[in-house]
Amino acid sequence: MINAILTTFSRIQKVFTKNLVMKYGLTSMLLLFTLLGVTAQKTYLKSSDSDPKAKKILDALKKEYNGYKAMEISFELILELKGQAPETQKGKLIQQGKKYFVSVSDQEVYCDGKTVWLHQKANKEVQINSFEEGPGADMMSPSEMLRMYESGQYAYAITGNATENGTKVTQIEFKPLDKNSEYSKIRLSVAENTNKATSIKVFSKDGSRYTLNVKSIVPNKTYAPEIFVFNAKQHPGVHIEDLRID
């Protein structure tokens, strides 16, 4: 689920924060960073410098989540934009293979594995893009989020333990090896008693912060294909902008 969380933030910045005057490009989670607080003053310059104990936790997460044929995640998204009061939004993510549906506030994202529809309900607008594959290409996809730590683009390490919302967690921080990354670091929290991801926090270089708190995960439900496709007939009067390049 690390991929689910990391991947989610990249798309969140690109998609969900567009109406909040955020830079187009948060997808992927918030995920991509300058590693802070690493013990032993070790310098992380390449992915092979990553903490083997952190990798063990991430491997276990990946094994569990990859075993799900589908998952439905209820979450809370906290947006802390520089110079603005924090905003909290509740949302839902449904993923089945490459397909997913995300609903947050007045925006929805549909993906059938080939096409992505961004529905901005307040503006009655829909943007259509082609689905992209590959590490970091679509952070909203849980499967991509978990691949992030294997992409070779980040170094990561356990930075400590904490109590978050009453749960004892292990914190793993990721550092983007690309100096031009818009993120300084990404922090993943994993519950010590269940080894499940509980939150992801993305630190942007512009001072903004994005936190995704996982409220519940329901695995292996069956979903109809139409859940992952935007149906224009159900939304009369919506303006559709097709941004796909043939």
Image: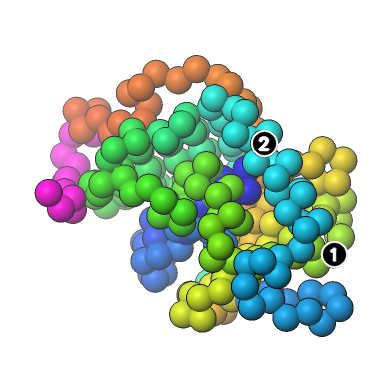
Residue 135 marker: none
The residue at 41%/51% (across/down) is: 134
Q: Which residues are magenta?
A: 235-246
On the image, the x and y values in percent for residue 224 come to 39, 18
Classed neighbour count for the residue bearing mark 2: other residues with Cα under 10 Å, few (<14), some (14–19), many (≥20): few
Residue 71: quarter of image = top right
Give the residue at mark 2. 63
The residue at 53%/57% (across/down) is: 151
The residue at 59%/66% (across/down) is: 154
Residue 58 vertical position relative to residue 86 in the rendered view, above or below = above
Which badge, 2 or 1, is on the more N-terminal residue? Answer: 2
Give the residue at mark 1. 160
Residue lying at the far left of the rendered structure: 246
CA gap, disc 2 to disc 1? Answer: 23 Å
Q: Which quadrant, please, contains the N terminus?
A: top right
On the image, the x and y values in percent for residue 143 come to 52, 42
Q: Is residue 58 magenta?
A: no
Q: Is residue 236 magenta?
A: yes
Looking at the rendered structure, the secondary structure element under dot 1 is: strand
